[in-house]
Structures are given as structure tokens and as C-alpha cells.
């Protein structure tokens, strides 16, 4: 077998020894630089990793804050809707009370029920005396929750507006009733303020018509409350005027449509044929026909009274008195309380009379006034009540 010559082997060994010596010398000389580069590369890799982790944590924190903010905002809006629903329920109860006063049930639309679906949000009014309870937010997508809440808020807006408009109609209607009753009482020659001792005095000012827009949901609390007070005061005025009208002699003294044979005022006296003042109305009626009280009151006289013949006088208060003359029979006694429609006597021809009829008088503070004004006002009032 051929072997390489010894000099070549020695040369190769020397070369390897030289390379090792050179590498060892390089490591000795450049050891710190190599180590520093390695450490620097490792540090850069670690810094990049930590920066990536920090960025991911920041993104997660921002997403959490955004979600928490959205849920907090939604919770605040739901709480506001809960409070508003409670206010609407209170307002609806107040409107129902007004409706009972005018015998007119008020319907303003049903409030949202907790089980109505995605736009109800589980809103429930708090128990009496307890603070409003905020329900847990429904577990649904943010878009669904936002959409449902928007629908709920729009519905509450609509109910608030409807309640305001309904209240405006109540005030207008009550005001019309007050004006009609005051005018009706005034037509009799009586002053409504003089009759109503409980009415407030010293009031006035320019007329500012009620605007329904001022009663809608935009002025949610204060505007509604002030106009609710106005409605209650106006309805109270109407009730007092109704009671006053009911105390006035506005009913008919005989059944059916009265036929006047001799009106109030100047006329030719049937006995002297000269001019004389006729202090009442002569109403055609058959002998024995019932004569009826035209308003509640107290019998102040029930006896024969000269030219009146058998006469009944009734005091209705407020200085208003009615008289029934020429009666065939008197069926009440002095001091007796009577109601409108009660029979006080029977039509006849006693006293200064030419035939059976009813002489009917109305006096205010002792002075005779035309009873026809009261009868006409009573007819108008009956017609108005029939249409209300």
C-alpha cells in the first residue's frame, strides 16, 4: 500500500496547528466583541418580544375600556328610561284622575311591558318608596341592544307627547265649560263672582292661549306639572259653577214646554185696562196641574197673599227667590226644604186672576226680574250637558 511521504504529513499537521492557533488567538483577541454581539442579538429579540406583548396588552385594555364604556353608557340610558317610564306612569294616573272628574276615561297608550320583547329592556317600576331598580343588561349583540333601546326611547317620547296633547285638550275643554257656565249665569242677571264666595279674587292678566307644544315630552316634568295644576284649577272652577247653576231656578215650573200667556214687563192690566208692571210670567196650565220648584231651596212663605191668591215663595240663596201664585192648593209649609222638581202646589185661579194659570216670578235681592232669562238659560244648560 502506498503511503504519503512524511514531509506532506508534517506539512498538513503544521497547517492544522497553525489554523487552531489562529482561531484560538482570534477568540482570545475578539472574545469580548463576539460575546457582546451575541448578547446584543439576544437583547434585541427579547425587547421585540416584550414590545409585542405590551402592544397586545394595550389593545386588550383599550378593547376592555371601550366595552366597559359602551356598557356604562347603555346602562345609564336604560336607567334614564326606567325613571322616565315611572314618571309617565305617574302622569297617566294623574290624567286618569282628571278623566274621572269630567267623566271621560283618558287613554294615552299603554306603557311598555317588561315582557314585550327586545325593546322592553326588562324595565319595571320600583316599589313604593324604593329607588328605581336597574335591571341587568340583556345579553345580546351591541347593535341589537342599541336598536332596542332606541325603539324604547322613541316610544316613551311618543307617550309623553300624547299625554301632553291630551292634557292640553282637557284644559281647553274645561276652559270652554267655565266660560259657557259663566256666560249662562251672567245671562240671568247674576254675577258669577258674587255668587261664588269661594272663588279667588284679585286675579287677571292678559289672555295667553294654551299651546299644546308646551305640554309635550320636551318639557317633561315642570311643564306638565304646571299645566296639570292649571287643568285641576280649571276643572275645579267648572265644578263650582255647575253647583252654582244647579242652585239657580233654571228648571221649568210646569212639565213640558211652557207657553207664556202674558210676559214679564209693562202690559195692559186685565182688570183696569191701564198700563201696569207685570212682575212675572203667566204660564198656561190646566187647573190642578202640579207646580214644581225650579231649584233647591227653603220655603219662605206658603199662604194666601192678596192678589197672588194662594202663593208659595222659595228662597234659593244668593238673594234669589221664586214665587208661585194663583194656586188652587198649597202642598208645602214654611221652612220646608225642597228640591228641584218637587211639587209645591196645584195650578188654580185664586186671587187676582181671570182663569186657571200659573203666575211665576223670579226676584233678585227683592227686585222682580224676567223669569224667561232663567228658563232660557236652563234650556241652554240642559242642551249643553246633553252634548258633553
Image (cartoon, rainbow, N blue to C red):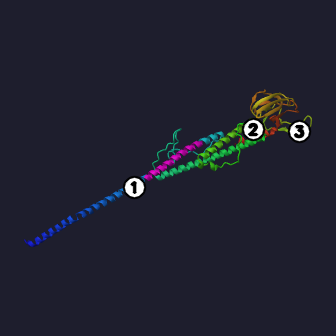
Q: Which residue is label 3 attached to? A: 267
Give the residues drawn in magenta, as a range: 65-92
Q: Residue at x 65, y 46 (%)?
A: 169
- Between 115 and 97, the residue placed more toward the observer is 97
Residue 294 % position (x, y):
77, 34
Residue 365 % position (x, y):
80, 35
* Residue contact at pointers 3 and 2, CB within 8 angstroms: no
Q: CA distance from mark 3 to mark 2?
A: 32 Å
Q: Which residue is label 2 attached to? A: 194
Residue density around tag 2, few if under 14, some if 14–19, many if 20 or more, within 10 Å:
few
Which mark lies nearer to you, 3 or 2? 2
Relative to 199, residue 42 above or below: below
Which is the main secondary structure of the residues drawn in magenta?
helix
Q: Residue at x 48, y 52 (%)?
A: 144
Residue density around tag 1, few if under 14, some if 14–19, many if 20 or more, within 10 Å:
few
Residue 380 % position (x, y):
75, 42
**Residue 366 is covered by the magenta coloring:** no
Residue 104 % position (x, y):
65, 41
**Label 2 SS:** helix
**Residue 87 is covered by the magenta coloring:** yes
- Residue 387 appears in the rendering: no
Q: Residue furthest left?
A: 1
Q: Is residue 284 left or right of residue 144?
A: right
- Residue 58 tag number: 1
Q: CA distance from mark 1 to mark 3?
A: 107 Å
Image quadrant where residue 300 sits = top right
Q: CA distance from mark 1 to mark 2?
A: 81 Å
Q: Quadrant of the N terminus?
A: bottom left
Nearer-N-terminus badge (3/2): 2
Image quadrant where residue 323 sits = top right
Amino acid at each position: 500500500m502506498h503511503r504519503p511521504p512524511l514531509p506532506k504529513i508534517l506539512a498538513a499537521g503544521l497547517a492544522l496547528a497553525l489554523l487552531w492557533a489562529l482561531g484560538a488567538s482570534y477568540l482570545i483577541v475578539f472574545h469580548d466583541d463576539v460575546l457582546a454581539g451575541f448578547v446584543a442579538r439576544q437583547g434585541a429579540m427579547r425587547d421585540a418580544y416584550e414590545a409585542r406583548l405590551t402592544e397586545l396588552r394595550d389593545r386588550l385594555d383599550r378593547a376592555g375600556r371601550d366595552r366597559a364604556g359602551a356598557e356604562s353608557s347603555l346602562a345609564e340610558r336604560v336607567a334614564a328610561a326606567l325613571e322616565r317610564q315611572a314618571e309617565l306612569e305617574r302622569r297617566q294616573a294623574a290624567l286618569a284622575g282628571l278623566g274621572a272628574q269630567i267623566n271621560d276615561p283618558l287613554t294615552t297608550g299603554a306603557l311598555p311591558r317588561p315582557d314585550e320583547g327586545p325593546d322592553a329592556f326588562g324595565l319595571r317600576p320600583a316599589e313604593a318608596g324604593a329607588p328605581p331598580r336597574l335591571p341587568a343588561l340583556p345579553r345580546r349583540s351591541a347593535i341589537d341592544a342599541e336598536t332596542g333601546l332606541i325603539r324604547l326611547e322613541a316610544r316613551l317620547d311618543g307617550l309623553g307627547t300624547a299625554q301632553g296633547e291630551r292634557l292640553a285638550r282637557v284644559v281647553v275643554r274645561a276652559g270652554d265649560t267655565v266660560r259657557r257656565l259663566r256666560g249662562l249665569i251672567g245671562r240671568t242677571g247674576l254675577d258669577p263672582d258674587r255668587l261664588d264666595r269661594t272663588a279667588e279674587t284679585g286675579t287677571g292678566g292678559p289672555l295667553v292661549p294654551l299651546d299644546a307644544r308646551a305640554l309635550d315630552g320636551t318639557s317633561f316634568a315642570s311643564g306638565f306639572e304646571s299645566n296639570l295644576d292649571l287643568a285641576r284649577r280649571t276643572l275645579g272652577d267648572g265644578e263650582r259653577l255647575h253647583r252654582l247653576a244647579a242652585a239657580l231656578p233654571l228648571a221649568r215650573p210646569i212639565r213640558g214646554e211652557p207657553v207664556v200667556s202674558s210676559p214679564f214687563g209693562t202690559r195692559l192690566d186685565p182688570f183696569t185696562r191701564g198700563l201696569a208692571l207685570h212682575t212675572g210670567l203667566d204660564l198656561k196650565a190646566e187647573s190642578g196641574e202640579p207646580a214644581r220648584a225650579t231649584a233647591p231651596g227653603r220655603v219662605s212663605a206658603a199662604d194666601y197673599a192678596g192678589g197672588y191668591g194662594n202663593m208659595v215663595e222659595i228662597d234659593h240663596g244668593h238673594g234669589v227667590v221664586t214665587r208661585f201664585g194663583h194656586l188652587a192648593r198649597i202642598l208645602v209649609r214654611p221652612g220646608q226644604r225642597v228640591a228641584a222638581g218637587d211639587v209645591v202646589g196645584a195650578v188654580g185661579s185664586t186671587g187676582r186672576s181671570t182663569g186657571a194659570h200659573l203666575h211665576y216670578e223670579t226676584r233678585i235681592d227683592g227686585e222682580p226680574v224676567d223669569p224667561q232669562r232663567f228658563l232660557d238659560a236652563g234650556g241652554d244648560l240642559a242642551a249643553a250637558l246633553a252634548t258633553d
